[in-house]
Image (cartoon, rainbow, N blue to C red):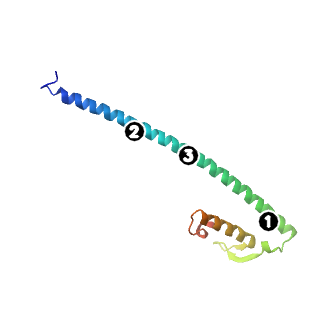
Amino acid sequence: MFEGNGSHILLGGMIRNHHTAVHNGDVADEWKAVAKKAQAEIARLNEAHAISESGKVGAMAQVKALREALKQVAPTHTLLADSGQRFPDGRPKSRIRLIFDQAFDAFAVQCGIKNPASIRDK
């Protein structure tokens, strides 16, 4: 039926094109599924980050309020004293700030950060 007129080549090409299209459709569907999972993971991580940052902001507000209260009742307390260390802009670091620095550095090292001091005071 298809002998001699080349239609078998055309039919074979059409079949091959169909299989390629089906395969490409499958691949596209797989990538869409991967993208959907990635978007869900990004959303979850964004929420976790927002919760973490919210907690940090709340804790810093508490620290500032407690520091101010300490200044009112015990202005010469050792935690308020100059530690002798400075921020990059030259401001003095109090001894209470060194507690933050030490905790920050220890946790950052546990998280795999090699030189936490290089990012801490930015």
Q: Quadrant of residue 6?
A: top left
Residue found at the very far left of the displayed protein: 4
Residue 32, how many percent across, how many down? Answer: 46, 39
In the rendered image, which residue does mark 1 sit on?
67
Does residue 23 appear to the left or right of 43 in the view shown? Answer: left
| Above or below for 11 versus 29 | above
Callout 2: 10 Å neighbours few (<14), some, many (20+)?
few
Q: Quadrant of residue 20?
A: top left
Q: Indicate which disc, 2 or 1, sits on the residue closer to the N terminus.
A: 2
Between the C-alphas of marks 2 and 3, the distance is: 21 Å
| Above or below for 47 versus 97 | above
In the rendered image, which residue does mark 2 sit on?
27
Residue 65, how many percent across, how many down? Answer: 80, 61
| Above or below for 50 versus 116 | above
Circle 2: element type: helix
Between the C-alphas of marks 2 and 1, the distance is: 59 Å
Between the C-alphas of marks 3 and 1, the distance is: 38 Å
Three-letter code for the amino acid on which mark 3 is drawn: Glu
Three-letter code for the amino acid on which mark 2 is drawn: Val
Q: Residue at image x 31%, y 33%?
A: 19
Residue 54, how many percent across, how many down? Answer: 69, 52
In the picture, the disc for residue 23 is: none
Q: Residue at image x 61%, y 64%?
A: 110
Q: Quadrant of residue 79?
A: bottom right
Q: Indicate which disc, 3 or 1, sits on the residue closer to the N terminus.
A: 3
Q: Quadrant of the C terminus?
A: bottom right
Q: Nearer the viewer, mark 2 or mark 1?
A: 2
Q: Is residue 50 visible?
A: yes
Does residue 96 appear to the left or right of 23 in the view shown? Answer: right
In the rendered image, which residue does mark 3 sit on?
41
Circle 3: element type: helix
Callout 1: 10 Å neighbours few (<14), some, many (20+)?
some
